[in-house]
Amino acid sequence: MQDYDEVTAFLGEWGLFQRLIFFLLSASIIPNGFNGMSVVFLAGTPEHHCRVPDTANLSSVWRNHSLPLQLQDGREVPHRCRRYRLATIVNFSALGLEPGRDVDLEQLEQEGCLDGWEFNQDIYLSTIVTEWSLVCEDDWKTPLTTSLFFVGVLLGSFVSGQLSDRFGRKTILFATMAVQTGFSFLQIFSINWEMFTMLFVIVGMGQISNYVVAFILGTEILGKSVRIIFSTLGVCTCFAVGYMLLPLFAYFIRDWRMLLLALTVPGVLCFPLWWFIPESPRWLISQRRFREAEDIIQKAAKMNNVAAPVVVFDPVEELSPVKQQKVFILDLFRTRNIGTITIMFLLLWMLTSVGYFALSLNTPNLHGDAYLNCFFSALIEVPAYITAWLLLRTLPRRYIISGVLFLGGGVLLLIQLVPADYNFLSIGLAMLGKFGITSAFSMLYVFTAELYPTLVRNMAVGVTSMASRVGSIIAPYFVYLGAYNRVLPYILMGSLTVLIGIITLLFPESFGMTLPETLEQMQKMKWFRYGKKTKDSMEKEENPKVLITSF
């Protein structure tokens, strides 16, 4: 039997071929960054109030007093969804009565915005909110739009792995890239909110599928020492770069249709990569397409300027198959110990995801420039990923994850104590909270993979990461609460983040432990205390080469 890594060791770890694959696959992730967060600007809600028709026969004084006032963040502002009954104030205006002097405004009958709304255009020229008036009675459609995008992400994560196993990594990578780009382009021609949202679900499916398949392809082609760098500094950082480009595009293009058009261009530019990114040789071998795998390795050897054997893959001497006992999802709950760990992981993944996406989606609601706030929210992810990578190399998992969660949750809780005039301090605390939660999120894949035995490891990572998709679906409604109270989302996110920080301390430790192979070995892991470690359990092993990502 042959081992793939041993057979292809002659290529080296970091030749021209590996560098090309590393950078091209990482670059293909950049469009995912701005597609994943584009709803921040596509569905931005500007300041608005009821329209009073120009044809209404009102004096200038009555026109200025046609809207009741409401209290918002400690100050009185014109009501967004109500106006004084137009027929009544037109009559008062005709009689020459003065508001406040002759007429008690508090006693006047009110009505809804029967003539539509006027939207402030200082920040956005147009969004789907202004296009289809998704405010007041229809304001529930805005968070639902975002939630349905993440429903698409959930659906895409179900099918992407199976499709790439069936049709090949490269084929599905570019097919899902086409789905993401093509359906984003079709959204430009949406005639109503329902059409836009339906297409957005499909964009979400393509977005996560492209992301997952690019990761799979990279980890199967790259060598062991490069995989963890690819999954952190490669994939995650390029996602953050795409996220940083979003506010730059949005700042210069403030019409939502033109913005969508601009965001599809980088996706189109990725298609020429078809001629540079090869199929996964591992997948080709699993399909017994040895000749195609051989050709790819021979070309790689030529690029790396190394001599290759005449025959790299011998069809007679097949590569070692991985024999694995059949497992089911209920195996994650087989015993009280495993079941409790699984439930705790589901909570940890879901609530960390809520914090990450709610903070990302809430940037337009922060004081100051919405575009600059979004850029800072993306920029803070780069040091968060680097910090997570450095911490994972040297420190116990549960303490570092719990520590960054306490940091993130604690500073979010402090926001309620900041005076309204100190906006810069509120923004700084929100960004620091984003740093802590992003760092924790990026470490969950490693921690989950290390705790579960080989038999159910892939299933455990898959099931628990699905909980994060549920968290992303819920997250827009945390942002929605900010319309009622500015600090309420931060109080909820901070409290839940501190809670899961405490829960994380209850997990068993995995750092420096031999990875469990069977369910029985996992059952022996100590819970609320370390207990006496055996000699074998103290043997250190390399961290598993798994995805470290915010998705």
Image (cartoon, rainbow, N blue to C red):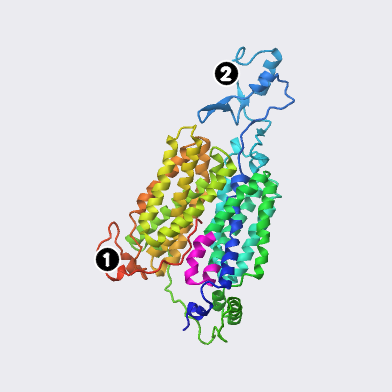
> Residue 533, labelled with which disc?
1
Determine whether the residue tagged by mark 1 lies in a helix, strand or loop: loop
Q: Main secondary structure of the magenta part?
A: helix
**Residue 230 falls inside the magenta stretch:** yes
Query: What amino acid is found at the position of numbered circle 1 in the picture?
Result: Lys
Q: Residue furthest left?
A: 532
Residue 284 occupies quadrant: bottom right
Q: Position of residue 361 (x, y in %)?
A: 54, 46
Query: Which residue is at a point 40% across and 56% down the rendered structure image?
Result: 345
Total marks placed: 2
Q: 383 or 471: which is nearer to us?
A: 383
Q: Is residue 224 left or right of residue 452?
A: right
- The magenta segment is 217-235
The spot of residue 190 in percent (x, y) is: 69, 48
Q: Residues within 10 Å of mark 2 (few under 14, many from 20)?
A: few
* Residue position for label 2: 107
Q: At which x and y percent is residue 161?
A: 54, 66
Residue 483, percent from left and from top: 53, 36
Residue flagged by tag 2: what amino acid is it?
Gln
Rendered residue at 52%/79% (across/down): 8
Can I make out residue 17 in this image? yes
Closest to the camera, between mark 2 and mark 1, is 1
Instruction: Say above or below: 176 vs 79.
Output: below
Residue 313 covered by magenta stretch: no
Q: Is residue 340 left or right of residue 283?
A: left
For marks 2 and 1, the one nearer the N-term is: 2
Crowd tier of the residue under label 1, counting other residues whose Cα lies within 10 Å: few below 14, some 14–19, many 20 or above: few
Q: Identify the residue shown where x is 45% and y is 62%.
A: 461
